[in-house]
Amino acid sequence: MDSSKTTQQQKDTKPTEGNPLSKAADTVKEAFQAHSANPGPAIPKEFNVQEEGTKEERRAKAQELNKQ
């Protein structure tokens, strides 16, 4: 028996081709493909949020809130 032919045959054929479980798994993967995305938070194009107070007031407020 020539071992080169058997390894070539193994490379050419897919072991899961025609398997009903692999077909079902592929169908499930395709169905849930949209749920595996990780797009991040939704941020509007014009994100104009006004800051409250001056820089010193915000810093003082942060220090006050961070006291233990």
Image: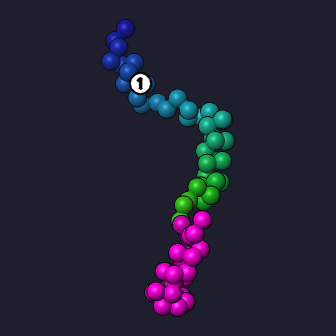
Q: x%, y% of residue 40?
A: 54, 66
Quarter of the image with the N terminus is: top left
Please, what is the dominant secondary structure of the magenta stretch? loop
Q: Does residue 8 show up magenta in the picture?
A: no
Report the front residue among 59 and 1: 59
Report x, y in % for residue 39: 53, 65
Q: Quadrant of residue 52?
A: bottom right
Q: Residue at x 66, y 35 (%)?
A: 21
The residue sitting at 38% across, 21% down in the picture is 7
Residue at horizontal 61 percent and vertical 48 percent from the top: 29
- Mark 1 lies on a secondary structure that is helix
In the image, what residue type sits under mark 1?
Gln
State the residue at coordinates (67%, 41%): 24
Q: Is residue 47 magenta?
A: yes
- Nearer to the camera, 66 or 25: 66
- Furthest toward the front, the residue is 68
- Image x and y of residue 44, in percent: 54, 82
Q: 57 and 10: which one is in front?
A: 57
Determine whether 45 is above or below 18 in the image. below
Report the magenta residues as a range.
40-68
Q: Farthest residue in the top direction?
A: 1
**In this figure, which residue is indicated by the disc labeled 1?**
9
Q: Local crowd at mark 1 within 10 Å, few (<14), some, or many (≥20)?
A: few
Tell me the quarter of the image containing the C terminus. bottom right
Residue 65 position within the rendered picture, expressed as x and y whole percent measured from the top left: 59, 74
